Image (cartoon, rainbow, N blue to C red):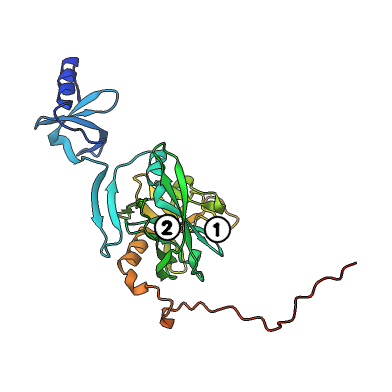
Amino acid sequence: MKDRLLSGGLRLIAASIMLSAIAGADVIELKSGQSIEGDVLKNDGANLYVDVGVDVVRVPLTEVARRSDSRKESEEVGDSGIYSTARLKRREVKTLAEEYGSGVVLVQTPGGLGSGFIINDDGYCVTNCHVIEGETQIAVILYEKRDDGTFRRRRVREVKIVALNPFFDLAILQIPKQDDLDFQPVFLSKDADYREGDAVFAIGNPLGLERSVSQGIVGSRNRNFEGLVYIQTTAQINPGNSGGPLFNTRGEVIGVTNMKLLFGEGLGFAIPVNYVKAFLDEYQAFAYDKTNPNTGYRYLEPPRRQDRAATPRPDKD
């Protein structure tokens, strides 16, 4: 089915490169269930000629089940309009971490640190509810990618709370727009098609160690805790990872990391993407309003000091 091209054919293919722009690596899925990844150099109506790096192969169109012509096979906007789903192609973790790392942020509150990830160009950011619970003074650290591939930290204050859902342990923040910086949103997985053994990776800020990447597999796709189903993963999850994304090897968010078992290694958990999308689709029902006592969140002032006498000081020798 895959006939090797002779050198004369290669010259013909090379000439055709100049006639049309070639997109990034394509994924050719065959009817046999196998797939080929490479640059499509030519389509003559009967065959595809694919550069697989070490050679060029001819693939009859009658054997092709599906072809993706770009990095994104498909993209859709969620029902609420505040997030996007996509079907991306598989790539190496180091490539995905470099591309989507700027979409992951460090969430700072007076009570501690957490992680989050940007979901649209308006600065909407998903994190865990417990990361910001009881807090109103919130800041985030953005990571701006430079031309040389390094990242520059930028601290943004006055982050707004948009919605809270303590049942799912999810929250939406809005980061104020920056005139000289474009947000880099990530995509949610279109389908919850992950299985036990699938490779995954997390990006977050465990123990304040910024932009840490940990890799593992899905240990269980339906671990039950208190009536909710979680993704169990061997990717290392530690305090500070909470609210960060759990990616598959396509770079799609399949979950939001939120907890681990104490004294257990490789036993981390993430909120499944189906719960995340359900919350985002109906986020207005969970809208935060600090002036409305019916929201269930009331931030009371601390009690005033009763004894106004001077603070006693130790006697001097």
Q: In the figure, 139 relative to 68: above or below? A: below
Q: Is residue 274 visible?
A: yes
Q: In the figure, 68 relative to 113: above or below? A: above
Residue 121 quadrant: bottom left
Give the farthest residue toward the bottom. 306
User: Residue 153: x, y in percent?
Assistant: 47, 49
Q: In the figure, 220 relative to 286: above or below? A: above
Observer-nearest of 199 and 276 = 276
Question: What is the crowding at mark 2: few (fewer than 14 residues within 10 Å), some, or many (at least 20)?
Answer: many
Pick whichever of labels 2 and 1 is earlier in the sequence: 2
Observer-nearest of 254 and 15 = 15
User: Residue 220: x, y in percent?
Assistant: 43, 54
Q: What amino acid type is highlighted by mark number 1? A: Leu
Q: Please tell me whether mark 2 or mark 1 is closer to you in this view.
A: 2
Instruction: Look at 19% across and 42% down and name the residue there.
Output: 66
Disc 2 target residue: 256
Quadrant including the N terminus: top left
Instruction: Look at 56% across and 65% down and name the residue there.
Output: 111
Quadrant including the C terminus: bottom right
Residues under labels 2 and 1: Cα distance? 16 Å
Observer-nearest of 296 and 193 = 296
Q: Secondary structure at mark 2?
A: strand
Disc 1 target residue: 261
Residue 124 quadrant: bottom left
Instruction: Look at 55% across and 52% down and name the residue there.
Output: 208
